[in-house]
Image (cartoon, grey):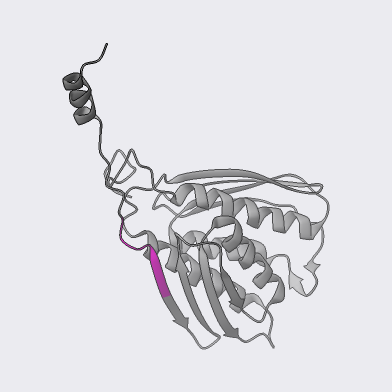
């Protein structure tokens, strides 16, 4: 039988975590001779999204990142769409990657790794990522058509290259099944969002430590 004194001692030995972290928000602007992009985000949001890039399919995918990643996201972009979508698509990825890096700061307390397997009808895509501080993309999508609506499907890879390089994450994307281009791409963005949500969650056992044996990411 546990006495009152022993119960108090047991309670005193129990670890106590202070999980109050600084606000994990960021606002980043990028202006070039080709584009003007503003991104605001809150990593601890509710999945609210405002996206206006001039590229409807990209806006749709940004909503997937926000909704399934549970981050509040505001992306406003203008670009030289009269040429094609490439510059705007890439610069949105660059600016979003920069905003992720800024909001995460030194990455103390995060889980760091994330993975998810997302189905969308016949399509099945696996995403695994690591906020490692080392940018790397392994891209395994085989999208059967050149376009979804007016969106050039080659730009999917360019978008993720830009995010990876500027957020300094390691990202692996694997397509396990799928024949419909829209389904494959949307499953990818949903899996990415869910994997990212897992990775940026605060780990209560790490408290304010950096999730690396080296002590730095």
The quarter of the picture where the N terminus appears is top left
Front position in the image: 127 or 133: 127
Instruction: Please tell me whether residue 29 is drawn above or below residue 182 in the rendered image.
Output: below
Instruction: Please tell me whether residue 6 is drawn above or below residue 11 in the rendered image.
Output: above
Instruction: Please tell me whether residue 175 is drawn above or below residue 32 in the rendered image.
Output: above
Residue 125 x, y percent position in the rendering: 69, 47
Q: Is residue 130 visible?
A: no
Residue 49 x, y percent position in the rendering: 57, 70
Residue 7 x, y percent position in the rendering: 22, 22
Residue 14 x, y percent position in the rendering: 25, 30
Q: Which residues are magenta?
A: 21-27
Q: Is residue 124 left or right of residue 135?
A: right
Q: Is residue 141 visible?
A: yes
Is residue 25 one of those drawn in magenta?
Answer: yes
Q: Residue at x 73, y 70 (%)?
A: 152
Is residue 116 one of those drawn in magenta?
Answer: no
């Amino acid at each position: 039988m546990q006495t009152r004194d022993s119960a108090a001692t047991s309670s005193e030995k129990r670890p106590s975590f202070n999980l109050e972290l600084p606000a994990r928000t960021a606002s980043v602007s990028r202006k070039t001779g080709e584009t003007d992009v503003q991104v605001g985000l809150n990593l601890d949001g509710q999945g609210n999204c405002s996206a206006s890039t001039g590229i409807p399919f990209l806006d749709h995918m940004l909503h997937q990142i926000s909704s399934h990643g549970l981050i509040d996201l505001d992306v406003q972009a203008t670009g030289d769409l009269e040429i094609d979508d490439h510059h705007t698509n890439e610069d949105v990825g660059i600016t979003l990657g920069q905003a992720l890096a800024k909001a995460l700061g030194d990455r103390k307390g995060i889980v760091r790794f994330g993975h998810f397997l997302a189905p969308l009808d016949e399509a099945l895509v696996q995403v695994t990522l690591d906020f490692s501080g080392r940018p790397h993309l392994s891209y395994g999508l085989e999208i059967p058509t050149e376009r979804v609506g007016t969106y050039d499907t080659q730009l999917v890879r360019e978008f993720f290259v830009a995010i990876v390089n500027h957020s300094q994450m390691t990202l692996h994307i694997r397509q396990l099944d799928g024949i419909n281009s829209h389904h494959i791409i949307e499953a990818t963005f949903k899996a990415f969002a869910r994997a990212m949500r897992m990775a940026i969650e605060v780990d209560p056992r790490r408290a304010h430590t950096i999730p690396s044996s080296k002590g730095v990411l």
